[in-house]
Image: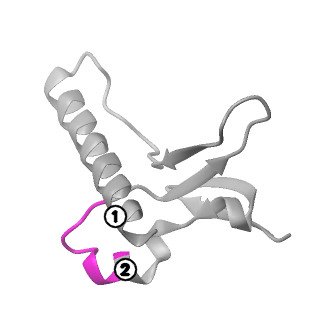
Amino acid sequence: MTEKCISDSGMVFGPYQDEHCFHIEKCGTYLRLRERVKIAEFLLLHPTKDSPSCIWVVEAKSSAPHPNNQIHFDEFIEEIRDKMVSTFYLSLAIF
């Protein structure tokens, strides 16, 4: 089993087992679409003992607007939501 770490936005994620991590930003399908589609950094299979495994969608952000700045915070949340939805659909299409 090989492991990998993913670096983004000044943060390092991992190490994760290679077969549990899909770095969608590096996949060929996304690289052909990247100017038109915004996505999260990677997907991580999170196995559990007592329930079915789940997939985490990981978006790296080194900063976020304060919730008191409602206009910027709402825009930030909308951008994250759009990335999550696009990541889900692109991943579904790839797999």
- Percent x, y for residue 3? 79, 66
**The N terminus is located in which quarter?**
bottom right
Judge whether 31 appears above or below 63 on screen. below
Q: Amino acid at mark 1?
A: Leu
| Colour mode of the rendering | one colour
Which percent across, then down, holds residue 48?
74, 37
Does 92 appear in magenta?
no
Q: How many marks?
A: 2
Q: Badge 1 is on which residue?
A: 90
**Residue at (72% x, 44% y) in the render:** 47
User: What is the spatial separation of the Cα atoms under label 1 and label 2, in whole angstroms?
Assistant: 9 Å
Q: Earlier in the sequence, mark 1 or mark 2?
A: 2
What secondary structure is found at the residue carrying circle 1?
helix
Q: Residue furthest left?
A: 71
Range shown magenta:
30-38
Q: Residues within 10 Å of mark 2 (few under 14, many from 20)?
A: some
Q: x, y percentage for residue 28?
A: 42, 83
Q: Quadrant of residue 20?
A: bottom right
Q: Which mark is residue 29?
A: 2
Judged from this view, the residue extending furthest toward the top is: 68
Q: Percent from the top left, x then y, of residue 45? A: 63, 51
Name the outermost residue toward the right.
1
Depth order, front residue of 89/9: 89
Residue 18 sits above or below residue 63 on the image: below
Q: Are marks 1 and 2 in contact (CB under 8 Å)?
A: yes
Is 68 situated left or right of 60 in this image? left
Identify which residue is drawn at 24% across, 47% down. Answer: 82
- Residue drawn at point x = 13 percent, y = 27 percent: 71
* Residue at the (76%, 29%) spot, across then down: 50
